[in-house]
Image (spheres, helix red, strand yellow):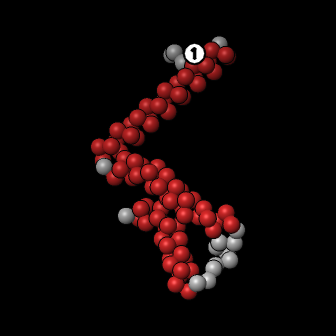
Amino acid sequence: AGVYTACNVPVILNYVLSADMWINDESYPAVYNTTFLYWYSWNLTYVASVCLNSTVNPLVLVFRMSGFRQWGLGRVRDLLTEKLMKRTTRANARTGTSNDN
């Protein structure tokens, strides 16, 4: 719930400011100080919020469910180990040494 709330705070603020501007018939120069922000702030907040929320949701699911968390961390560990082994093999090939005992 915290991630969802954090992702949608800009949208909520836009709603509040827009409603206040509509009710009181006044503008907020600090917020809508340019024509670009005045016309595109809604698009920016919605796109940013939806993209951020869509990006964070899978991460929340992975770390919330133990099966996914174990699978994900195991997969990352395997990828890092494989990368490290390739790097070590390449470095050994350049220097002419090996890891064999």
**Quadrant where the N terminus is found in the figure:** bottom left
Q: Residue furthest bottom?
A: 24
Q: Nearer the viewer, residue 64 or 94?
A: 64
Quarter of the rendering containing residue 71: top left
Give me the residue at 43% from left, 31% from top.
Answer: 78
Q: Position of residue 99 (x, y in %)?
A: 54, 18
Find residue 27 and report its horizontal and vertical position in percent.
63, 79
**How many numbered marks, from 0 up?**
1
Looking at the picture, which amino acid does disc 1 mark? Ser
Drawn side of residue 61 relative to residue 30, left or right: left
- 75, above or below 38, in the image: above
Residue shown at 56% from the left, 86% from the top:
24
The spot of residue 31 in percent (x, y) is: 64, 73
- Tell me the residue that label 1 is attached to: 98
Residue sitting at the far right = 34
Q: Residue at x 58, y 25 (%)?
A: 87
- Left/right placement of residue 40 relative to residue 64 reads right
Image x and y of residue 30, in percent: 67, 76
Q: Residue at horizontal 29%, vertical 43%? A: 67
* Above or below for 2 versus 61: below
Regarding mark 1 in the picture, which secondary structure is present there? loop
Q: Visible in this render: residue 63?
A: no
